[in-house]
Image (cartoon, rainbow, N blue to C red):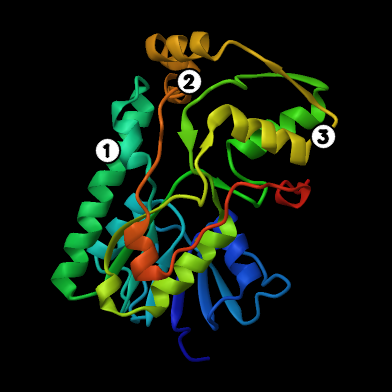
Amino acid sequence: MRRPPLLVFGLSGQIGDALCRRGLPLPVLAVSRQAREPGAGEGPVEWRASGLDSFDEPHSFEAALSLGPLDAFARAVASGRVRAGRIVAFGSTSLHVKGRSPDAAERDVAARLVEAEAALFAACRQSGTPCTVLRPTLVWGMGRDATVSRVVRLARRWPLLPLPMGAPGLRQPVHALDLADAALAALAVDRHASGAFDLPGGERVAFGEMLRRSVAAGAPGCRPWPVPWPMLAWAGRVDARLGGWASRLADDLVFEDRPAREALGWAPRGFAPSAADFPL
């Protein structure tokens, strides 16, 4: 069997699920920590059980796509263990936001993202490899995210759920299928699309309204109970155990997407979730 032209890390994650729905440019070598068989609609996907830190392939691929941890992928590229004619990797807009968090773990996440991007671009410049980093905001749509889908899971169990419904900070949640489209576009365009692109969703919605729409779509039998969001925001600033998210309830986390629209044809949907976006 000839070497697959596309190498993918993290295909078993939520963006990988979306890519499989959209249709992968086949054939593919998919690297996952756990061995698995191709799923329905995946076509000729060759799965290999390996972690990023242990992966070492002497062959060069036409392209490599990373949907998983950016720091581990950057190390693999910098060390020459991943070789490809084009590199596309997902990062996160968290590098813009979490560096100011009261939570030390979140600050560490932001620092590692910044360092990983710098290391990846440096390695690709040295080898002359076009490199694109895609930075999504809050991802939704596959029922696997840790924000709105987690809230919906709680709402399905509790008929009355306390939530900061009035929190005014704007968010731009982005659907996983739109991110799959962006990844496919980045793999297809020429080297002028090299660089890092923020990928916010197509609508700016208040944090509390985002929760309300999610619960209404995924758990219509639940009645949200509004809690005083300013109290949570204050507590989040003084007590990192609540997580950095509480300190940002009044912050507008919005990002410019014009570069992605121009380079990648980025045209994300607004936030209008349905029950199908929160599968059991």
Tag 2 residue: 246
How far apart, in angstroms, are the residues tagged by discs 2 and 1? Answer: 20 Å
Q: Residues within 10 Å of mark 3 (few under 14, many from 20)?
A: some
104 relative to 79, above or below? above
Tag 3 residue: 220
Mark 2 element type: helix
203 relative to 208, above or below? below
Residue that lies at the very extreme toward the left in this rendered image = 126
Q: Earlier in the sequence, mark 2 or mark 1?
A: 1
Tag 1 residue: 111
Q: Earlier in the sequence, mark 1 or mark 3?
A: 1
**Quadrant of the rendered image containing residue 218:** top right
**77 and 233: which one is in front?**
233
Q: Nearer the viewer, mark 2 or mark 1?
A: 2
Mark 1 element type: helix
Q: Is residue 12 visible?
A: no
x and y percent of residue 179 in the render?
Answer: 51, 60
193 relative to 156, above or below? below
Q: Kindly identify the amino acid type of the residue bearing the numbered disc 3.
A: Pro
x and y percent of residue 86 in the render?
Answer: 32, 76
Q: Is residue 152 visible?
A: yes
